[in-house]
Amino acid sequence: MYKLGPKNIKDKFDIQLVPGDLSNTSKSAILNSDIAIFTEGNYPFKSKNSNKLPVVIDLWHGFPLKAMGFADRGEKFKHLINEIWDNIDYLTSYSSFFNEIMNKCISIDMSKYVVVNGHDKIGINGHEK
């Protein structure tokens, strides 16, 4: 995503690819940014600055085809799920169907889901609806 970003966006905004090593340099870059983009609920901080920044966007990596999170009867870390996902401001989504299925797993406020790039037109088997 970083490498393929459009030139006009890269020219207009200060976009940085920050290592996930949580070094002091990485922490500072993340916590002092306006927007932080992660995947799989891996935003590692519990607090934001006084301006409620950064806005945290999660680019979930796929459709939940198996039980996970709250939907998984064998999930050993259910007590941590809310804590992980409370830090996310927006979760990119394929469709309202994805929102419904994913929310059974992570139980976040439905207003956090944002359908992007017309993926809501893709059917279960990748065929147009």
Image (tube, rainbow, N blue to C red):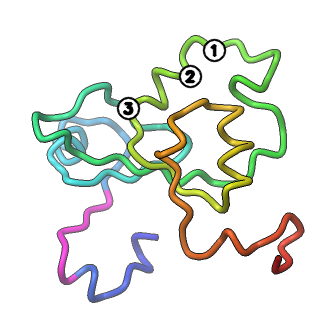
Q: Quadrant of the C terminus?
A: bottom right
**Which quadrant holds residue 15?**
bottom left
Judging by the rendered image, the residue that carries numbered circle 2 is: 81
Could you tell me which secondary element the residue under label 3 belongs to? loop
Where's residue 16, x and y in %? 26, 62
Q: For mark 1, does the 10 Å Cα neighbourhood hold few (<14), some (14 to 19), or many (20 or more) residues? A: few
**Amino acid of disc 1:** Phe
Identify the residue at horizontal 58%, vertical 51% (top origin): 60
User: Which SS type dominates the magenta stretch?
Assistant: loop
Mark 3 against mark 2, which lies toward the viewer? 2
* Residue 129 painted magenta: no
Judging by the rendered image, the residue that carries numbered circle 3 is: 44
Query: Is the residue 35 above or below the residue 9 in the image?
Result: above
Q: Are marks 2 and 1 in contact (CB under 8 Å)?
A: yes
Judging by the rendered image, the residue that carries numbered circle 1 is: 77
Q: Residue furthest bottom?
A: 8
Where's residue 77, x and y in %? 63, 14
Label 2 and label 1: CA atoms lie apart by 7 Å
Could you tell me which secondary element the residue under label 1 belongs to? loop
